[in-house]
Amino acid sequence: MSGPAAALAPVAFPPLSRATLTTLQVNLGYRCNQACSHCHVGAGPTRTEMMDAGTLALIPQVLAARAIGTLDLTGGAPELHPGFRALVRQARAQGVTVIDRCNLTILGEPGQEDLAAFLAEQGVMVVASLPCYLEANVDQQRGSGVFARSIAGLRQLNALGYGLPGSGLELNLVFNPQGPSLPPPQQQLEADYRRELEARYGIRFNRLLALANMPIQRFAAVLRATGELERYQQLLRANHQEANLAAVMCRGLISVDWQGWLYDCDFNQMLDLQMPCLRREDGGGVGSRRHLRDLLSWDPAGAPITVAEHCFGCTAGAGSSCGGALA
């Protein structure tokens, strides 16, 4: 095939397999105090899905059984789960690094006035969404008044030592493009954020993580409505970099949904692209889908990773992962 038809033909994403499991990323529920246009989860104030106590109790057991060094908590707003603080204390007592995917505005919500102090006391790494250092851009993407509340949250964290040299309290910011485009180079963008946030608001932080928007869920619906979905998917495919495959997050991370089901990444979770089923012990047909409890005895190293069209969002350009650019 040649010509325009070949340019539009779907390209299969290369096969991947797992390396050593280092990070357990857990979605505690879809309830959030915001409803952002780029949210691939579709989280918001009216969502009711929350992890139950029995599933929550499995998390420290799995961390110990698999010697996992990092627990990455997300949502929704993970802090809204009633078991959030107890889980953080348990994981930290086990010597596990805990990441809180924080939207910043949660720090000012009623009942959360002491949340920032709790995070600092436990030495939690805060990864905070701030898609731009300009107020108008943030409010357009995340809602009116969100920028001012985010700056207030950052000031709370800075006052406790987050983002300051020698404090041991890590504060990383997350950038997402406002539309269907790849993030600019992370290093230069970080320099811009550092300069502008300190000059305008006195805000300091450790690192900026530049993440591509995934064409799924709420963001995909916006692109579809504006006729830009296929163009964005083509942009991701055209900018695929083979070298990024070695560092994609799914090789060392497992994503857990609010019911305890396992996925290769957070994006697969939102699309319900399940990990391959367990084989029955008797060698018979297909067994059950993988659950958090399976990690008590199952080592996923070497297992195949479920890939699809959206995976090009992680390998396009400088690459994108929960830890920012790959290149």
Image: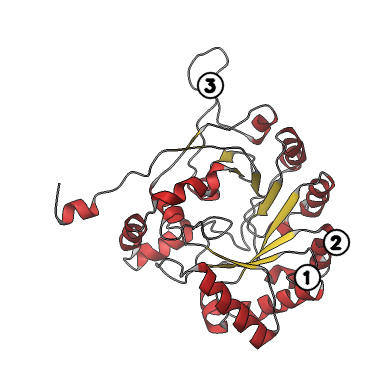
Residue 311 visible in the displayed image: no
How packed is label 2: few (under 14 Cα within 10 Å), some, or many (20 or more)?
A: few
Q: Measuring 81% from the left and 64% from the top, which residue is drawn there?
A: 120
Say which residue label 3 marks.
279
Q: As rendered, which of 37 and 316 lies closer to the eye?
A: 316
Q: Secondary structure at mark 2?
A: helix
Q: Is residue 310 above or below residue 206?
A: above
- Percent of width and height locating residue 185: 47, 69
Amino acid identity at mark 3 = Arg
Q: Judge depth for marks 2 and 3 and give the one in front.
A: 2
Q: Is residue 54 left or right of residue 23?
A: right
- Foreground mark, 2 or 1, reads 2
N-terminal of the pair, mark 2 or mark 3, is 2
Q: Quadrant of residue 289?
A: top right
Closer to viewer: mark 1 or mark 3: 3
Mark 2 and mark 3: Cα distance apart in space: 44 Å
Residue lying at the far top of the rendered structure: 282
Label placed on residue 125: none
User: Which of marks 3 and 1 precedes in the sequence?
Assistant: 1
Query: Residue 256 location, x and y as percent?
Result: 62, 43
Mark 2 / mark 1, whichever is N-terminal: 1
Q: Which residue is depicted at the point 34% across and 55% down?
A: 237
> What's under tag 1, amino acid-wise?
Pro
Q: Which residue is mark 2?
A: 121
Q: Is residue 127 left or right of residue 231?
A: right
Where disc 1 sits, the SS reads loop
Tell me which amino acid carries mark 2: Glu
Q: CA distance from mark 1 to mark 3?
A: 47 Å
Is the residue marked by circle 3 packed among few (<14), some (14-19), or many (20+) residues within 10 Å? few
For disc 1, the marked residue is 110
Q: Residue at x 79, y 63 (%)?
A: 168
